[in-house]
Amino acid sequence: MSDASAALIPAVRAHPEGEADGWYGWIASLDHKQIGIVYLIAGVVFFAVGGLEALLLRTQLATARNTFLSPEAFNQLFTMHGTTMIFLVVIPLVIGLGTYLVPLQIGARDMAYPRLNALGAWLVVLGGLLLYFSFIAGGAPDAGWFSYAPLSEKPYSMGTGVDYWILGLFTLGISTIGAAVNFIVTIITLRAPGMTMTRLPLFTWMTFVNSFLILAALPVLNASLAMLLIDRVLGGHFFTPQSGGSAILWQHFFWSFGHPEVYIMVLPAFGVISEVIPVFSRKAIFGYEFVAGSTAAIAFLSLAVWAHHMFTVGLGRAADIFFAVASMLIAIPTGVKVLNWCATLWGGAIQFTTPMLFAMAFLVQFTFGGITGVSFSAVPIDWQVEDSYYLVAHFHYVAVGGIVFAIFAGVYYWFPKMTGRMLSETLGKWNFWLMVVGFNLTFFVQHVLGLLGMPRRVWTYPDLPHWTAFNRLSTIGAYLLGASALVFLYNVVLSLRGGPAAGDNPWHAWTPPSAVGPRPSAGARGGILRPPSPPAAGRPADGRSRARHGGLHRLGGRVLRRLDHRLRVLP
C-alpha cells in the first residue's frame, strides 16, 4: 500500500443469506469467497497429482539405465507433470487468491460478473478432467507441455492424447481469460469511494496488471491450439513443413504466449510478497510507486522476449540481438522489486512467522533463478545449455523456488481470514524447512548436471562420472519435497478440525482484508482507508520512530484529516 494508506475502520457486513450450505451450495454459489476457495481446492488437488508424477519421474532418473518406467510412460508423465503444474496448479491458485481477496481489498461486495466468476472456476475442473481423461482414452499426451510441431502432429502422435491436451488447455484458456476480464472490470468499476488507483493494495495492483497480460497472451495460445487441432483432425497444414506449413511457426506462437505466461504466474506471487513482507517487518512497503510501476514495465517487456527460447533455431543476428537485449532489460524492473523488498526488510522489526519465512526464501531463491535466467540472454551460453538440465533447474527456481513458495506464504498468511482458524506455527516451520532443503537439494545440483552435458527430457542416461550421484541427490530432495507437502496437508486438516481461533486480525496487519473478521460472509466488504496511517515507509512501527519524526507524523496527520471528509464508509 502507499505511504498515505491508513489503518482501517470495521467494514459493514452483509446478511449471510447469499451463502448456500452443503455440497449444492458450493457448486451453485456465486459468492467470490466460496468460488475462490473452489479454485484453491482444485489447485491443491492437482498439485498432489502433479507432485506424484514428479516423484515417479525422479524415481526413474535416480540411477543410470533404470527401467522403472517405460519410455512411453516417461514421456506421458513429464508432459502431464508440466501441463498440470502450470495450467492446473499455479494459475488456479493465484486466480483463487485473487478471487477471494481482490473484492475485500477494494471494498466491493463481489466480483463484477459473479456468474462468469463461477463459470471460470468450474471450467478449471472441466479442463483438468478433459486432460486426465486422455489416460483412459488411448493414452496421455507425450509431446511435452509445449507440444512442439511436427512431433504433436498426427503422423508422430497417432493417439488421442494430444487432442485431449488441446481441448483441456483451450478450456482452461477460456477460464483464465474470463477471470482476467472480471478482475479488470471489478477493479476499475467497483472500488469503494476513496480507494484510488494509487491506494490499491499491491496484491490488487499486480492482479490488475496481470489481467491485461493475460488478455494479451492467452488468446495467442488458444488460436494456436485451434490451428493444431485443425491440422490433426481436419487435415490442415499450419505446422506441417512437407505441405507448406511451418513447424517454427508453432514455436513463435507458443512462446509468444509461453514466456508472458511465466510472468502471468509470477506477478500475483510478487503481490503476495509485497503484502507479507511489510506486515512482518512492521513497516510500510518501501517505494510503493516503484513497485507498482515496475509491474507494468515487466508486463510490457515480457511480450518482447519470447524468442530467447529459440536462439538455437537460427533466427539471424538482428533477431538474436533484439531478443537478447530485451531479455536483459526485463531484469531491471524485476531487480527494482527485489530492492524494494530488501529495503522494506532493512531496519524493520522482523517477525519470523511461517509466512515470513516463505517470503524470505522466495527472495533468495527467486533472485538466484533470475540470475541464472539472465545467462540465457547471452546467445553463446544459451546455445550450450538451452536443452540441458541447467534450463530445468533455472525454470524450477523461478516456478517453485519463487512462485510456489510465494503461494505458500500467501496461504499461511490468509488462511486465518478464510477459515477463522490458525495453522500450527510448529508444523508450518517443519513444512518450511523440509521444503527449503528438499527444493534446493533437488534443483541446485541440476545446474551442475546441465553444465556436465545431461540433456533434459531423457528417459534414462549412461553411467557417466557424477551423473548418477547428482541424480540420486536430486531424487532424495524430491522425496523431501513430497514429505513437506504431507506436513502441510496434515497442518490444514488439524487446523480445520480444531485449530485455535484466529480472531479478527491475527497478524496485526493494516491491509484492507484485516477490516473484515475471519470468514467474512457473502457480500461482506473490505474496509475503507482512513487515519491513523500504518508505519511510514522505511520506518519501523515503534515509538522511537514516531518520536524522532514527530513533526513529519503531525504534518501527515493534518493532511490526512483534511482528506478524511472525502472518505466514507459504504452501507
Image (cartoon, rainbow, N blue to C red):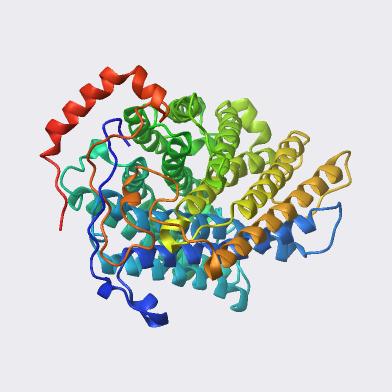
Q: Residue 138: image x %, image y %?
A: 62, 76
* Quadrant location of the C terminus in the rendered image: bottom left
Query: Image point 63% across, 26% down: which residue?
Result: 380
Q: Quadrant of residue 18?
A: bottom left
Q: Note whether 212 is above or below 518 in the view shown.
A: above
Which residue is at the front of the view, 332 or 9? 9
Residue for point 86% across, 55% down: 65
Quick check: 121 left or right of 136?
Answer: left
Quadrant placement of the N terminus? top left
Position of residue 333 measured from the top left corner of the image (x, y, whole percent): 42, 28
Visible residue check, residue 22: yes
Query: Residue 363 at x, y = what percent?
Result: 55, 35
Q: Residue at left 44%, top 63%?
A: 419
449 up-or-down from 24: above or below: above
Camera-side residue of 545 and 283: 545
Which is more toward the observer, 96 or 358? 358
Q: Which residue is rendered at x = 71% and y = 36% of the image? A: 447
Position of 148 relative to 557 (above/below): below
Q: How many labels does the image show?
A: 0
The reply, left or right, for residue 14 in relation to residue 280 is: left
Q: Is residue 156 visible?
A: no
